[in-house]
Image: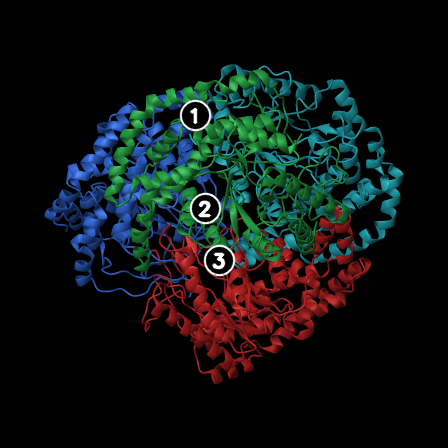
Chain colours: A cyan, B green, C blue, D red
Amino acid sequence: MIDKNLIEAQNAALAGAVQDDYAALGAKLARRGVDIETLTARADAFGVAVPSWGTGTGGTRFARFPGEGEPRNIFDKLDDCGVIHALTGATPTVSLHIPWDKAPAADLKAKAQSLGLGFDAMNSNTFQDQPDQAHSYKFGSLSHTDKATRQQAIDHNLECIEIGESIGSKALTVWIGDGSNFPGQTSFTAQFDRYLDSLKAIYGGLPADWRVFSEHKMYEPAFYSTVVQDWGTNLMIAQELGPKAQCLVDLGHHAPNVNIEMIVARLVRAGKLGGFHFNDSKYGDDDLDSGTIDPFRLFLVFNELVELENTPGLDLAHMIDQSHNVTDPIESLMISAMQIERAYIQAALVDRAALEGYRASNDALMASATLRAGFQTDVEPILAMARLRKGAAVDPVATYRASGYRAKVAAVRPRVTGGGGGIV
Amino acid sequence: MIDKNLIEAQNAALAGAVQDDYAALGAKLARRGVDIETLTARADAFGVAVPSWGTGTGGTRFARFPGEGEPRNIFDKLDDCGVIHALTGATPTVSLHIPWDKAPAADLKAKAQSLGLGFDAMNSNTFQDQPDQAHSYKFGSLSHTDKATRQQAIDHNLECIEIGESIGSKALTVWIGDGSNFPGQTSFTAQFDRYLDSLKAIYGGLPADWRVFSEHKMYEPAFYSTVVQDWGTNLMIAQELGPKAQCLVDLGHHAPNVNIEMIVARLVRAGKLGGFHFNDSKYGDDDLDSGTIDPFRLFLVFNELVELENTPGLDLAHMIDQSHNVTDPIESLMISAMQIERAYIQAALVDRAALEGYRASNDALMASATLRAGFQTDVEPILAMARLRKGAAVDPVATYRASGYRAKVAAVRPRVTGGGGGIV
Amino acid sequence: MIDKNLIEAQNAALAGAVQDDYAALGAKLARRGVDIETLTARADAFGVAVPSWGTGTGGTRFARFPGEGEPRNIFDKLDDCGVIHALTGATPTVSLHIPWDKAPAADLKAKAQSLGLGFDAMNSNTFQDQPDQAHSYKFGSLSHTDKATRQQAIDHNLECIEIGESIGSKALTVWIGDGSNFPGQTSFTAQFDRYLDSLKAIYGGLPADWRVFSEHKMYEPAFYSTVVQDWGTNLMIAQELGPKAQCLVDLGHHAPNVNIEMIVARLVRAGKLGGFHFNDSKYGDDDLDSGTIDPFRLFLVFNELVELENTPGLDLAHMIDQSHNVTDPIESLMISAMQIERAYIQAALVDRAALEGYRASNDALMASATLRAGFQTDVEPILAMARLRKGAAVDPVATYRASGYRAKVAAVRPRVTGGGGGIV
Amino acid sequence: MIDKNLIEAQNAALAGAVQDDYAALGAKLARRGVDIETLTARADAFGVAVPSWGTGTGGTRFARFPGEGEPRNIFDKLDDCGVIHALTGATPTVSLHIPWDKAPAADLKAKAQSLGLGFDAMNSNTFQDQPDQAHSYKFGSLSHTDKATRQQAIDHNLECIEIGESIGSKALTVWIGDGSNFPGQTSFTAQFDRYLDSLKAIYGGLPADWRVFSEHKMYEPAFYSTVVQDWGTNLMIAQELGPKAQCLVDLGHHAPNVNIEMIVARLVRAGKLGGFHFNDSKYGDDDLDSGTIDPFRLFLVFNELVELENTPGLDLAHMIDQSHNVTDPIESLMISAMQIERAYIQAALVDRAALEGYRASNDALMASATLRAGFQTDVEPILAMARLRKGAAVDPVATYRASGYRAKVAAVRPRVTGGGGGIV
């Protein structure tokens, strides 16, 4: 989709600057006893999954303002994901959402293979009603008071597993909107019990090498209570289900002021951290591009991941989960992938021996400064070099714009209108 | 729409209990030196406007689950509003939203008159694109960087005033979603200047006896910054525009933990409080039924309004603004109107002389207890008696259900599907 | 301390009104199928513990403004607690804080017995340094990096158990301020491991019929991270320690907007809810009088407790934990005890059969209304009658003021100056 | 206090690395069309005031854990401030707090001059009672219900102006803790009127070339309402007082999630931004070291200041206001001064012409990326070079530690014990 020659030509113009900056950063890091190549190797190996639905323009309950060349189906979406990976070299997998992305397995696999992509976790959808659906999810899905509705939601998740198996996925992510809008509307305990029963049925359908990720969220679309409202409830679920169940952390799903990096540490210790839905937020589940609102928070999350990376059994699934309402989704996803990678490399260059020493002596100021030194280092030369070496774009956004990809697909993908606007 | 005989029959069964409870409460209040009839007269005179769009089922960015018998147009909406007023006796006016409610003025007036309804403030809409619109509001409306887009939004607001004039409205409410999703996306100051320029053009089009209400909101649909983000900015706007401009307070539009009743007091003192958009919220702009999440907060707002009710020039516009996602909108609007009225009457029975005495002597405990005594009084007998006397329903929800209204309109209003779901 | 004759005289003047209001409420409840005497029996049996330190005037980090007649020691504090119980009949036990309340066990028991009081949970203090202390808690206590400091903190807790045993207490409450002020200052995981090791040593010292309550808190005095930051971590602790370990919920220790009643439900389901520290808050751990800021939240907590009251093994410890900065502490504690009792009785009168029916049919509006009906009922006549019948004061604050107790103790307890002001 | 030779020796060892990094950064910036020397000149000219009280160890309401060598009086504090300025070259002024820092003007001036320091804004204190005080501030100061108490507070502020005049200060900062702890305790409006009357009296006492800075804060030490609770009220105050009154923004004084940089922009537009109290916070008014919790937020504030720096009449007072509970205050203040300077220089290197272009074309992604490019640049070489050139320390903390200053003063300043602990 993106001409390799274009990437090479664009890179050629920037390669000199990349080499200079890389050398200067290498010298600076060497002074601190850090080998830049170790970091570049980390950057080279890094990957984060792209959500298929992230390639479309998102909206709010007030409106959706479509962009040009919106993907019409999963194959268009895979094309867009292929562009992102070709340019950033950092997004080797795609996460599908069922039923939105249903298609013959062979076609999906062939398409993905042709783009150098694989499939990450499957996502089920029981927060919307589909046209052909027997039972409505208006009042819940996996935790609904009605057994038939719960069974319908269970069956849908089992189908997601089945589809996932056919395309090489190894995990199912479950997020539901079930909850209540008014005090009294539901029994917290009975609703939770029903949810657990449903999840157990799904868990029973997991292949031996699969995992199920449960995702907590404080609120929305339910505005008084949500079944899996925080990591405490999420932990209870993962504990009750068994070893194949783990918790997924979405950075925008917590109460104001919450220390998310600490939750990450706790879940690792409990052996129940499964992975992340990356995005950024200022107010609620804003689903903004990763690292654009509070980049230090993203760094602190990766600091925990690097600090704990040798924890036995730790096997994390990293995924982006965002809503791109005012930008070209391909560009936003590239920015996010690079911001996430940036935070990871910054965390990786922290002098952990020094840090531990300061901690042991309660030298709060130098411990804090040591950690911050990682964040304050501009590691862009490392990321750029990793991309340059693997044939991705030194400046993915510029190369993407130079490619004219959006205009090309807009010519064949018909203009969409409206959507969104739940308040109408 | 609701048979008067039904109301009478339903009331007849409850009248005895109402009389008993009213007498008991009257005796209790008399002991405190409060004349119950004074409060009942207040209840009788109380009214809050219903938003036309509130009669439809709302949704979230994830989905909308329509109910039965959704109104097809403004005339159906007015029918529903008529039901609400007939049963509660507390919602004599309707607030229209343009372009959703556009219709010939004569028809609107005739319909409203037939239902005993009047028209409250007009609401403009520049947060969505209409099919026939020349310029998109994707990147803003009244504060857009493009002059032609701003002019389009101005013209729309001027048209709202024109329509309002033709049906007897006396105010325009302006709420916009303009803002930004990313740091840097917009210049806060330049955007605010453009917004003010646009509002000045609209202000210039206000008839002599009209007011314009500006509404602040912390976030959503913009997730990093919003032009009118809080009451401070709202105050600056109202000050810059002139005496016909006032601030509207929506209870769900503030930062977590904010003391809203204090904002009410400040705006009254600045001579700039125009009125309210009532609803309740736990997290963000949840738009839940008034008084269902934090009834004491609603009471404290009314406490300020009663304490300051003799402020010269104070003339408040009370309106409900909610999203009914899981209930019958007619029922939710009735509950809200009654909860608002309840808070008002509770505030009205506070012993203000005693309260002032405790304040003067810094007797915090007794001052607090004196205020709380109002809130802790169950004033339902007063509200029920006021309804009984004016021929509304003692128990509006029960009578509404007994009337079979929803089933009747569902038979003629076709079933709607889907909608919402901006994230798709 | 309070003349029985005074109480009787004061009650005599109010008894008529109490009888009238009680009869009227009884009639109203009877119409709903509720027997008022069942509720009065519940009120009669209700008790909440008073914290010994709550009888002194609290302060902030900016200043402390002492009141008159501040208790000089635990015996003065017990006198004050005796007054509270004599007047409210609702606070039969006192919770001690060590080392503040250290005294010979025989003296403590004799004093308490003379006042009709018993002892509730013991509270340890490792968030302050005592003059004679070998190791400072500046950088932590039970989770300190230094083993000797941790052992000192462990020993202190073991001593608290020992003291508690000697006076008939059956539980130890552990709250620590350990955490960090800067990212990087501490390893979340290592600090947590050290904390767990310390708690295990304390747990090992628990007598067979004792429990240990672990208390979570989002922040303060540590302002970046806190070891037991939320109920999720608290649950992990209680699970790891064993059956005698349970979680304590302080209503002011959560993130903004958090649904606390849901946490209560989850902890009950996990078999790990131990009890409460009651108070109210608007912003952080404000420690205001219970029920004075968000009475509906308090009601919703009790709604869960009543809904789940037949859960096998549920045995809750209710305690008030407040800071009285601008009121007479005795008055504030009486108000709080009565507000807590009020919320409990309101929750007890909810029509649970009707509620379950509405939940089963997803009638969100009526379920919500059914719950709210409990909260909207003014149950004061029930509380007053329960007090009247047991010889406590119908109007505890008025009778307390009439007694002149504060002036009497002020005459013998010397005036204290200053204190507080951590920022200086 | 710090040997110049030590600084030189320490710098000598680092100068080579500084030169290398400076050259590399200069080359990189040159590629972007930015002249590094322009930025270094900005860094050289930058200064922020140090609060005299910041040199002591702070505490919380739970406890205060003193450090070694705590300053005994204002002269010790000035010594410490002199050290900070000698090492960072960025803190040329000190802000005094009365009555804590009262001393003969000539002595203060002589001491400051000897250290190369000047005096910034004066701070009054009416949130604590002083031993000799006629009226208590327990229930308020400038807004107290009692006229004599208000007059006492007014007189104190007038005295602060007088002292300030004698030492060359040009501004008075007013922050009060007045408010209420319970709904009903105070009349919001009457209390605000009393506050304004008091401030007018103080305003009347301002010399011609002085300003008064009013500071808003959401809560604490009052936990239900605060007189100057947010910037909206602060703006009303500054407007009512007149041109010499301006608003001070403390970064830790806002509600959760609030967009502070937007408030900065609004206050500049209103002509009422006076300056800042810099610190960082995660939860409330945590008073942590600047830039240690959310460095991007600090950058965004400076982005507004740079964007608006040519606004006519803009004259900002920058001051640090922190509480150092677990670090050496001198070290924390140095870190903060450097973090503030860092944010300023990062904001200064943003390509504003490119930014405006992207804004004009609604290219949200590139506008955001352009702004972020400033933040992501590690400007430490510029700050280090500015310090090196002016004879300050390249690595202030390392040089400070090498100097042994703390041990030296600890030898002459007696050890302090305890303090704080308002909850006791």
Q: Which mark is residue C218?
A: 2
Query: Comparing marks 1 and 3, which lies closer to the viewer?
Result: 1
Query: Comparing marks 2 and 3, which lies closer to the viewer?
Result: 3
The C terminus of chain C: image quadrant: bottom left
Q: Are marks 1 and 2 on the same chain?
A: no
Chain of the residue on which disc 2 is drawn: C
Q: Are marks 1 and 3 on the same chain?
A: no
Element carrying mark 3: loop
B7 lies left or right of B95:
left
Q: Position of residue D307 (x, y in %)?
A: 69, 60
Cα separation, mark 1 vs mark 3, equals 44 Å
Element carrying mark 2: loop
Q: Picture quarter containing residue A64?
A: top right
Q: Position of residue B30 (x, y in %)?
A: 25, 42
Cα separation, mark 1 vs mark 2, equals 42 Å
Residue topped by disc 3? D217
Q: Amino acid at mark 2?
A: Met
Chain of the residue on which disc 3 is drawn: D
